[in-house]
Image (cartoon, grey):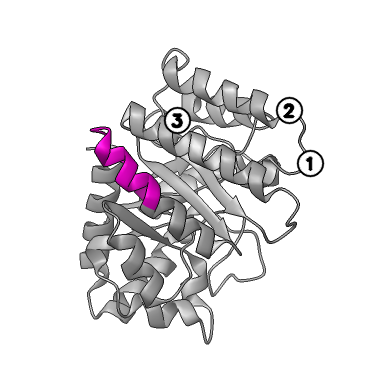
Amino acid sequence: MIRLIDTHSHIYEPEFDDDRTEVVERAIAAGVDRLLLPAIDTHSHARMLDLARAYPANCYPMMGLHPTSVNENPTWRDELTEVETFLRQPPEGVRFVAVGEIGLDYYWSQDYVEDQREAFVAQLRLAAELDLPVAIHTRAAWTDMCEIIERETAAARERGERLRGVFHAFSEDVETYKRLKACGDFLFGIGGVVTFKKSALAETVREMSPEDLLLETDCPYLTPVPHRGKRNESSYIPYICARVAELTNCTVEQIAEQTTRNAERIFGLE
């Protein structure tokens, strides 16, 4: 059986409270034997860490503050302090594989742009200092994202550090892919959107190198065809793998092997 990694799974969220064990078991049975768990904010840390402890060989946590958790949150700087404390002093038996999920999201509101930028840059610099990759969320903010990544990767190099990671749920055009790739060691998370009919992402993936790709679900969201409209879960990674293989003129086995190798390298899973 091929081995796959879901590099972005929120199965610790309440949507899975009724059948979380079965969801993990279905993923493992489908060959998806490692799930990476991006953090959101303090409201979900306990659930995420409990899951990582329950499945230490399968579930790997990240730590970070999601951009939408900055919005309408007067204590977001306190949350950033908690993120830093976790990363500098992880709980016993826990290893964080990335700083994430962090980023910019202007879709819901333009009122918190400066706060989101401040939180994002602070976490980028913390990741570079600690030599951890970042898992980056971007929605309706690509201009700012590209400018910040270009500036911060250059600044990290000047400090003798490295800024690297993945652009989660990447769905932009080839030009954006090339611009971000030129910044350094960045990979691009491809999820269920690539399976949608008339998906613009599909055309971008045709032009991308498998060496730059990761597979992800972002479950319970962005469910791939043929389950679109239902709750997503990590066992659906093979549908995404098959579509990426088709678009890149590779075999499923080749994409599984390459994306697994990519994830192991960037997240230190080897």
Q: Position of residue 237 (x, y in %)?
A: 43, 60
Residue 18 in view in this figure: no
Quadrant placement of the C terminus: top left
Q: Position of residue 19 (x, y in %)?
A: 64, 43
On the picture, is 75 further left or further right than 138? right
Question: What is the magenta range?
Answer: 151-165
Residue 120 in view in this figure: yes
Relative to 63, residue 134 above or below: below
Q: Which residue is pictured at 73% across the width and 28% down the height?
A: 75
Q: Which residue is pictured at 66% across the width and 23% down the height?
A: 78
**In the rendered structure, which amino acid carries the disc numbered 1?**
Glu
Q: Secondary structure at mark 2?
A: loop
Other residues around mark 2 within 10 Å, as few (<14) / some (14–19) / many (≥20): few
Displayed quadrant of residue 110 = bottom right
Q: Position of residue 145 (x, y in %)?
A: 49, 57
Per the model, the C-alpha gap separating discs 1 and 2 is 9 Å
N-term mark: 2 or 3:
3
Q: Which residue in the protein does label 3 denote?
A: 55
- Viewer-nearest of discs 1 and 3: 1
Relative to 97, residue 213 above or below: below
Query: Mark number for residue 97?
Result: none
Query: Mark number for residue 75?
Result: 2
Q: Secondary structure at mark 1?
A: loop
N-term mark: 1 or 3:
3
Is 211 one of the magenta-colored residues?
no
Q: Position of residue 162 (x, y in %)?
A: 27, 39
Q: Secondary structure at mark 3?
A: loop
Q: Which residue is pictured at 37% across the width and 54% down the height?
A: 150
Q: Which residue in the protein does label 1 denote?
A: 72
